[in-house]
Image (cartoon, helix red, strand yellow):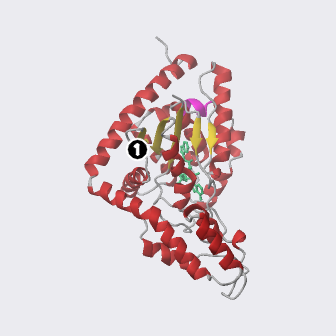
Amino acid sequence: MARTMSGIQPTGNLHLGNYLGALVNFVELQRQYESFFCVVDLHALTQRPDPALLRRNVREVAIGMLASGVDPERATLFVQSDVPQHAELGWVLTCLTPLGDLNRMTQFKDKSAQQPENINAGLFTYPILQTADIALYRAEVVPVGDDQDQHLELARETLRRFNFVYGDTFPEPKTVRSKAPRVIGLDGEAKMSKSKGNEIGLFETADETLQKLRGAKTDPARLRKSDLGHPEVCNIFALHGFFTGDQQREEIAAGCRSAQLGCVDCKKMLAQNLELVKGPIRERAAALREAPGKLDEILAAGAEKARTAAAATMELVRERTGLRHR
Ligand code: AMP
Ligand code: TRP
């Protein structure tokens, strides 16, 4: 069976961008692929998180993946640092990656601007570790949002180089996009993200979400309820696209254009429909938090399976690169 692999950083609470851009595809792909889904705590170290907070976030992201429908019977769910081969293969690939390739990465520039006091080498080599994540499981498809396009392109180039230098070893990983590869935040401008504070959290209550939606940007040309609206440029209407049925959406669009429906009511409808998805996720997450032993078991079993697959790939890599000297 072909394999899929993806990772999420434990740098904060999961939000709708993670859910719509990545998680829904994890749940879909786990039916057709041998799946490896990973909480990438080594990547998170590039932000030098408080240790207690990192530990908490690792568990919360794992809980979020399970609550969203990742099934540990089908998919291998694990924590990156439980599998030492990620760092090991990362080094081998570091030695194959030209500095010039890393210099082009826009995420490095963005992150450096976000944390000017801590521009560490890990931020720079971050995409190589990501390439190792994918290559370790010889994954063919990688479900991610479109902010990862550049990293995936670098991964393909690096693995092509490995194959050229050492002989055919790794498949070229293809990106799989969901219907929402770029969810815009509540500011109506930037990509929804933890660092921008413009997100709807996956675990938020209905009240918290409605509160946040009240302040969210809509059609910039619609200042009063009596102004005619333009749903096609409204980010709230775009979100309806993922949570609201066709008929209600048509009614909303017509009401907005004719100024019969105000933004507040439109937002309330979105909050209600969101709750139909978020409510059950929140409940499943709460149940998982109540049973920390169960989460430990799932992650231990996942780590075991991931290590077995990783060890097999590293055998091959050691053989091909001459790292096996006996
Ligand atoms: P991160 O939280 O940065 O580790 O992202 C985890 C996954 O969510 C990656 O596949 C991202 O591409 C995806 N993702 C993050 N933010 C968004 C967004 N606003 N829209 C779509 N996908 C996103
Ligand atoms: N860099 C990804 C992000 O910020 C997370 C990630 C790490 C990842 N390793 C990966 C995604 C491997 C896909 C495959 O979202």
Residue at point 65%, 84% (across, down): 260
Find residue 52 and report its image quarter.
Answer: bottom left
Name the quarter showing ligand 1. Answer: bottom right
Instruction: Classify 154 as above or below 229.
Output: above
Q: Position of residue 221 (x, y in %)?
A: 73, 80
Q: Is residue 181 visible?
A: yes
Q: How many marks?
A: 1
Packing grade of label 1 (10 A; few <14, some 14-19, many >=20) is: some
Residue 315 or residue 217, whichever sits in front: 217
Residue farthest to the top, as pictured: 326
The vertical placement of 259 against 302, above or below, is below
* Part of the protein shown in magenta: 90-97
Q: Is residue 55 magenta?
A: no
Q: Is residue 164 above or below residue 11?
A: above
Question: Residue 244: where, in percent of width, then height?
Answer: 56, 65
- Residue 202 appears in the picture as rendered: no
Tell me the residue that label 1 is attached to. Answer: 71
Q: Residue at x 49, y 13 (%)?
A: 325
User: Which x, y percent locates residue 102?
Assistant: 67, 42
When the figure is inspected, residue 249 is found, relative to residue 149, above or below; the finding is below
Residue at the (68%, 40%) spot, across then down: 153
Question: Which element type, helix, strand or loop, lies under badge 1?
Answer: loop
* Rendering coords of residue 184 (x, y %): 63, 64
Give the prevailing secondary structure in the magenta stretch.
helix
Give the left or right position of residue 54, taking residue 292 as reference.
Answer: right
Instruction: Place residue 84 in its image quadrant.
Output: top left
Q: Nearer the viewer, residue 176 or 154?
A: 176
Q: What residue do we see at 35% from left, 42% from top?
A: 299
Amino acid under label 1? Asp
Residue extending furthest toward the front: 247
